[in-house]
Image (cartoon, coloured by chain):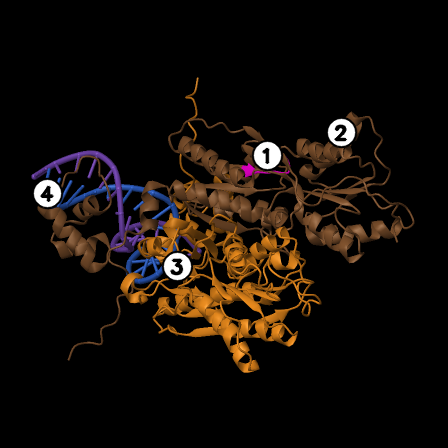
Chain colours: A brown, B orange, C blue, D purple
DNA sequence: CTGAAAGCGCTAACAT
DNA sequence: ATGTTAGCGCTTTCAG
């Protein structure tokens, strides 16, 4: 009677394969895992090794190889992905990242930091060999990389709240996009334009507000007083901040248009507006920012940012940095790239309403 | 004049730290990386090591540790994430996965397989030590795990097209959810209910269609003829399949309601319907399936699946499996868990329309 | 063409 | 309480 065959607890190794094939582990390595500089293998050995590998279901161990290569072929993505509501913005950049990473044979591992003050402690922990470089999505970290990122940790930012010295960044043109949107509303004849902006402390939100202001300035029109609100970049934010404002302005004319600093905020506004029975765009025009799936679904007019492209470019820049690091070339470490935005007209824009409409 | 200080190409190791502190690498390991069985360290050594580590900015190398531990503390997620349109379904399950994984100190790396026939070749490659286990999202693979998954590769499926023998699976109650939706439409008085179902070959889509049929059967009503369509689970799918159907049925009464097999399909239908000038729900009621962000945003009535919970449970099940594997316990390898669904009424449901309405 | 030896950074087991 | 040895699975010299 033979022993109860305890299942082997580990996968076959090169040594196992070599033993099975009657050759050295090294030969097996040469056959199975690419081109050891100048090691040629006889036809016959090659076939024995291949057969043994097949039989043993050999799979190369990537951690072992990484230890030697100092390279995992994995990219890290860090951001705040899930708050209370799913983050469409994230999803679209992520799509772009996955595309480009896939095309370049890189995996991506996702790190969800709860907030950016913790991140400063957490992110360095991720730079421990399991990934070759980092994409930081919308980081809010002011300190220069040299103060908190490990050395030789290639990284790029996308939509950094503020440029992180030492880390190249990708941005889209927030100010210009906002200018586009508000100029268009002005051109349609709207004057009482409410800006439901992003959170205080966000440079992107500040820039969008500045675009709003410049549009008025360049049109030679004085912006209406108390028509700028700020809230988180979420539907909840839009919902929560709009209602009190309406209450506060009861009896005054309803704004003719709302420029929301994100599609999510626009969604929140839309819900409140519809709940009050206002029609969009007949009673009030609405324009968002981002052109996420939501804007497409809700036929929301918006300012399109090239979200997928941002993701794809981030991967390319990061890989360039990684290669530079590994070949000890100096990388372009402070490059800032700004991508253009464009207006997308859908169903939520119209000219000023016909009749007077006061806030109830 | 000193040499141009070439930047060190590698991070500090335990050996470096030990050297700096004047102790062995082993002592440094004991101090810095937890509890080596019975190795106590003197106060003084500890502090020297800590200081050295600080000075050298020591970071433990995870690939090295993984080689020893046979554990990366990383989970793999494989699915088809990005087709032509962002996948909200994915996003919500992913959110749940990230939550649970984060809580358990696991990273997650995402593998985007283009399709499930390639996956069968690709997935085994991912089981090479960089992850400890795999969550497969909506796999369409019929072959038993033993035929293609490496041994000792813990895995769970979520919404597997068909149970993969040897791999525990998480499902939601497709048939029951569809039954719920259609029964409700019937109760509202609708009879000509069009089912825009998921793709042929998808068990989930089949089950939803069966739920549709059972609802009629149990209500003792004969389903209308030629009122079942099948298309991909996307908005594009809904859009593409609905129009030809309407054309084919020109002159007949417009269906009173549509039961779409996913929110994305519902979205596609909604767009076509609105383009034709039909009002929802006055002219035609609409109900989706999934309760993704889109349904919430568009105020689409739908069947809610616990997407986030599915993700969280998948992580817990997978971790249990991994631990079982590592301690050589037998895991519950064929468990199937089915989670309930529920109806969510929003703005796209109403009773039958007042006036006759023929397809134009 | 092939094998032996050393080492990637870490930890477990066994000395001291 | 601390150091030494060996080895995780792989690759890269360097000899044969």
**As displayed, is residue A109 above or below residue B300?**
above
* Residue position marked by numbered label 1 in the rendering: A171
* Residue A77 screen position, x and y as percent: 51, 46
Which residue is drawn at the image coordinates 92% and 49% (left, top)? A251
Which residue is drawn at the image coordinates 42% and 51% (left, top)? B112
* Residue position marked by numbered label 4 in the rendering: A42
Callouts 2 and 4 on one subunit: yes
Quarter occupied by residue A329: top left
Where, quadrant-wise, is the C terminus of chain B in this rendering? bottom right
- Chain-order first, disc 2 or disc 4: 4
Q: Chain of mark 2?
A: A
Callouts 1 and 3 on one subunit: no
Q: Nearer the viewer, residue A7 or A306?
A: A306
**Magenta segment boundaries in residue numbering:** A157-164
Quarter occupied by residue A330: top left
* Residue B299 screen position, x and y as percent: 67, 60
Callout 1: SS: strand
* Residue position marked by numbered label 3 in the rendering: B132
**As displayed, is residue B353 above or below residue C5?**
below
Q: Are marks 2 and 4 in contact (CB under 8 Å)?
A: no
Q: In the current view of this chain or complex, which residue is farthest to the right?
A: A251
* Residue position marked by numbered label 2 in the rendering: A214
């Amino acid at each position: 009677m033979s022993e109860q065959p305890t299942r082997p607890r580990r996968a076959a190794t090169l040594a196992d394969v070599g033993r099975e094939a009657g050759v050295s582990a090294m030969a097996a390595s040469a056959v199975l895992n690419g081109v050891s500089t100048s090691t040629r293998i006889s036809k016959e050995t090659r076939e024995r090794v291949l057969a043994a590998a097949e039989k043993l279901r050999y799979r190369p161990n990537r951690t072992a190889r990484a230890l030697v290569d100092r390279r995992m072929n994995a990219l890290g993505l860090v951001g705040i992905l899930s708050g209370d509501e799913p983050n469409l913005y994230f999803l679209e950049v992520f799509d772009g990242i996955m595309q480009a990473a896939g095309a370049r044979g890189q995996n991506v591992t996702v790190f969800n930091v709860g907030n950016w003050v913790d991140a400063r402690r957490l992110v360095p922990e991720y730079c421990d060999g399991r990934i070759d470089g980092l994409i930081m999505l919308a980081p809010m970290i002011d300190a220069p990389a040299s103060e908190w990122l490990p050395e030789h940790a290639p990284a790029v930012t996308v939509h950094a709240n503020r440029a992180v010295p030492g880390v190249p960044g990708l941005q889209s043109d927030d100010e210009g996009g906002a200018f586009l949107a508000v100029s268009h509303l002005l051109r349609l004849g709207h004057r009482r334009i409410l800006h439901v902006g992003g959170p205080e402390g966000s440079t992107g939100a500040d820039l969008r507000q500045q675009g709003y202001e410049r549009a008025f300035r360049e049109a030679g029109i004085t912006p209406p007083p108390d028509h700028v609100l700020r809230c988180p970049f979420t539907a909840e934010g839009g919902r929560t901040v709009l209602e009190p404002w309406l209450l506060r302005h009861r009896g005054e004319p309803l704004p003719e248009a709302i420029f929301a600093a994100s599609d999510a905020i626009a969604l929140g506004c839309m819900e409140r507006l519809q709940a009050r029975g206002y029609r969009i765009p007949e009673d009030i025009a609405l324009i968002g920012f981002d052109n996420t799936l939501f804007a497409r679904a809700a036929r929301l007019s918006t300012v399109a940012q090239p979200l997928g492209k941002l993701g794809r470019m981030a991967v390319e820049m990061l890989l360039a940095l990684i290669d530079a690091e590994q070949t000890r070339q100096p990388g372009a470490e402070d490059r800032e790239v700004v991508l253009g935005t464009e207006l997308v007209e859908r169903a939520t824009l119209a000219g000023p309403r016909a009749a007077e409409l006061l806030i109830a």
